[in-house]
Amino acid sequence: MSKARIDARFAALKAEGRAAFVAYVMAGDPDAATAAKILEGLPAAGADLIELGFPFSDPMAEGPPIQRAAQRALKAGMTLSGVFDLARGFRAADATTPLILMGYMNLIVTRGIEAFARDAADAGVDGVIVVDCPPEEAGPLADALDAAQVSLIRLATPTSDDMRLKTIVRRTSGFVYYVSVAGVTGVKEADAAEVAPHVARVRAASGLPVAVGFGIKTPERAAAIARVADAAVVGSALVDEIAEAVEMNEDVTQRVLSKVSSLAKAVRSARVGQTTV
C-alpha cells in the first residue's frame, strides 16, 4: 500500500487541478506527545502530504531552524524507534495521507538498512528521503525499500545537469524533491520564475511529480511555487512556529496548525484560473 498512497494522492490532486501542500515537521519536537498531536492535526489543517524528519545530531543540509528542532527533539529523548511509534500512531488514525520520513544515513545504517525498511513499512511510512545518500551508494537502500514497498525519493538541485538527472531519477519513485536554492534549508527564498524551468526539466527526466522545497516560508511564496510545481514543501517556517510558541508559552499545536492552514489555503487557491501547470 505504501507507494500506492503517494501515487494516489498526486493523481487526485492533478485531477483537481492543483498542487500539493507538503508540511515538514521534526519528530519529537518539542516533545513526543506534542509532536503526535501536531501530526494528527496536519491533514485537517490542509497538509496533502507530510514529511516527518528523524532527528540527527549533524543535519548537514539544514539551516538553523531545523537544526534547533533536531536538538530539541533529541534533548526530549526522541529516537528512531520513537519516530516509528509516531508514524504508527498517525497511520492508525489516517489511512490515506502519505507520510514521508526525511533524514540522514547514519541512523539507517546503525539500525540496519533492511530492518529500517521493514520498520518503516510496518509503521505505515510511504517514502523516505535520505539527504546524504548519493545515488551511486544507494543500491542496498533502494533494494530494501523496494522489497518493503516504500518509495525512495531523491533530491535534485539547481546544479543537477541533464546527465546527473539521469542518475538521480533512476530507481526514484513517488516524486522528486527539487531543492530550489543552493544551500541549506530556511535561509534563502525560492524564486518561482527561476524554479519553473528546472521543475519542467526534472519532471521530463523522471516522469514523476516534482515537489519544491528549501526556500518557502510565506503563503505568497508557497502559492507562487504551487503554480509551477506539483507540490510546495514548507519546513523551516513551521518549526519556527514551534520554537516561538514554546518560548512564549503558547499552545504549540494550535499555532503550528494555524500556520499550516494559511499556507495550505494559499497553495489550494494558487492555480485558480489556470488550466495547466
Image (cartoon, rainbow, N blue to C red):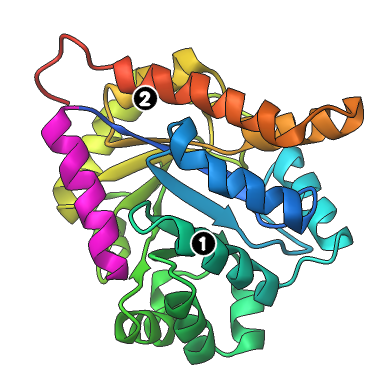
Q: Work out whether 224 lies above or below 251.
A: above
User: Residue 156 at x, y = what percent?
Assistant: 38, 50
Magenta residues (range): 1-17
Q: Earlier in the sequence, mark 2 or mark 1?
A: 1
Task: Name the residue carrying label 1.
Answer: 101
Q: Nearer the viewer, residue 108 or 136?
A: 108
Does residue 21 appear left or right of residue 190 in this picture? left
Residue found 46% across the figure and 13% down from its top: 220
Does residue 228 appear left or right of residue 207 in this picture? right
- Mark 2 against mark 1, which lies toward the viewer? 1
Q: Nearer the viewer, residue 41 or 53?
A: 41
Q: Which mark is residue 225?
A: 2
Disc 1 residue type (three-letter): Leu
**For residue 63: magenta?**
no
User: Residue 23 at x, y = what percent?
Assistant: 50, 40
Looking at this view, name the residue that lies furthest to the front.
93
Q: CA distance from mark 2 to mark 1?
A: 22 Å
